[in-house]
Amino acid sequence: MSQKVVAYVVTEALVKASSLLPSNKGRSFLVHTLASALGFFDKSRGYSNILVFRPSPASRSDLCLYHDTDYMILIFTLANQEALLSSRAPNDASSFGLEDDCSFFEGLQQYCVLVAGATLSAVKVLKHVDISIVWDGGRHHAGKSRASGYCYINDVNLGILSLRQLKPRPRVMYIDLDLHYPNGVADAFQTQTAQTASVLILSIHHASAGFYPASPNALLPAAGTPHLHTLSIPLAQGATNATFHRIWKSCVQPVKEAFCPEFIIVQCGVDGLAGDPCGVFNWGLDLNDEGSLGWCVNECLSWELRTVLLGGGGYNSANAARAWAYLTSIACGSPLTLGDPIPDHPNFPQYGPSFTMEVDVGSFSD
Ligand SMILES: [Zn+2]
């Protein structure tokens, strides 16, 4: 396994802001403290090819590379709960999706500029490194002017669009491994314009009646659909490594070869892993098992293209921390062993009862 240079994009402010996200409270803190406890940021422990890259927050004009100005103005104006509850704001908030699963929270504005800034910085740093990692990114449901599915800002689209500003415009392939269909990303690139041309979106996810997000595009495209640039591979409940392996060999690999991308962005949402409260897939992590999440990400890295790895869903926070630490070790070319114990650190009690890196595979049928 060749040693690549890896940028791990994080700051304390980003961890603090992401840890306030109502759908994943405290998760960011677990993720980055485990990474630190495993020694990723300590050259004396053998990780000489990973560097911590401190991102700049996104400016309002950075955010408007994808998002509508009115939506951004609202995000920047909603500095507190009182503003939301004032006479005019509730209507605004609801028309921009800031309700239910995307309610306002203290720190929302800071969260948006930091997460967007992290992914934009991860894209920029690819000039100097092979792989960049933003485990707080991957917010693939947010729309141009609408929060949706726990996502307030679409850092994925910002990252892709900023890559497309390079001259000459590169070919970008986005692979989404989250349990949920990336409606916010697919909607942005469904219509091909000069800015969105040569971007290929490929998602492997679950789709069924009533499962979020309800989108006809989450289903298999009809045969003969012309000019397809958003490819959907919906899987039924219970998908295992074997299913992912079959899809990878018969579809993902040939599509990549036909498209010839110059950059890869992989959304590594971990809500399809066994043990996630979503309880839909039965997907494993171990690189040694063909078709697992670790194996799929390693396949992407074996293409030897500049790659951004993003986070995403994942509602068992300890397993998300395990999985993303494991994927970080794969990116560094020194994969951890999943049977290894969790190192002693202040969050150690959260990794019981196994206290190992292992994410146990469930037993429901594929
Ligand atoms: Zn998800």
Image: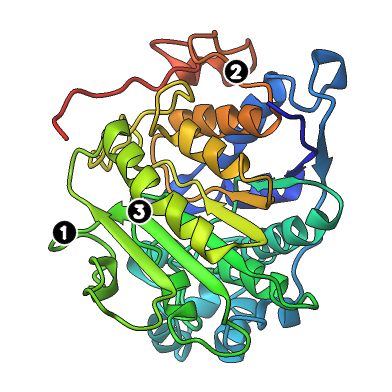
Give the image location of residue 184, x and y in percent.
Answer: 44, 72
Depth check, front residue: 2 or 236:
2
Q: Residues within 10 Å of mark 2 (few under 14, many from 20)?
A: some
Circle 2 SS class: loop
Mark 2 near mark 1, Cβ–Cβ under 8 Å? no
Name the amino acid, label 1.
Ser
Mark 3 or mark 2, which has the lower sequence index? 3
Image quadrant for the C terminus?
top left
Residue 208 badge: 1
Report the residue at 58% width, 50% height from top. Answer: 310
> Is ligand 1 within 8 Å of the beta carbon of the residue shown at mark 2?
no
Residue at mark 2: 336
Report the residue at 44% width, 74% height from top. Answer: 229
Image quadrant for the N terminus?
top right
Mark 1 near mark 3, Cβ–Cβ under 8 Å? no
Q: Is residue 46 above or below residue 84?
A: above
Residue 73: which quarter of the image? bottom right
Mark 2 or mark 1, which has the lower sequence index? 1
Name the amino acid, label 2.
Leu
Circle 1 SS class: loop
Residue at mark 3: 204
Name the amino acid, label 3.
Ile
Question: Is 11 on the left or on the right of 145, as rendered?
Answer: right
> Is ligand 1 within 8 Å of the beta carbon of the residue shown at mark 3?
no
Circle 3 SS class: strand
Give the image location of residue 190, x and y in percent.
Answer: 43, 81
Give the image location of residue 128, x and y in percent.
Answer: 87, 51
Report the residue at 54% width, 79% height from top. Answer: 83
Q: CA distance from mark 1 to mark 3?
A: 13 Å
Residue 343 badge: none
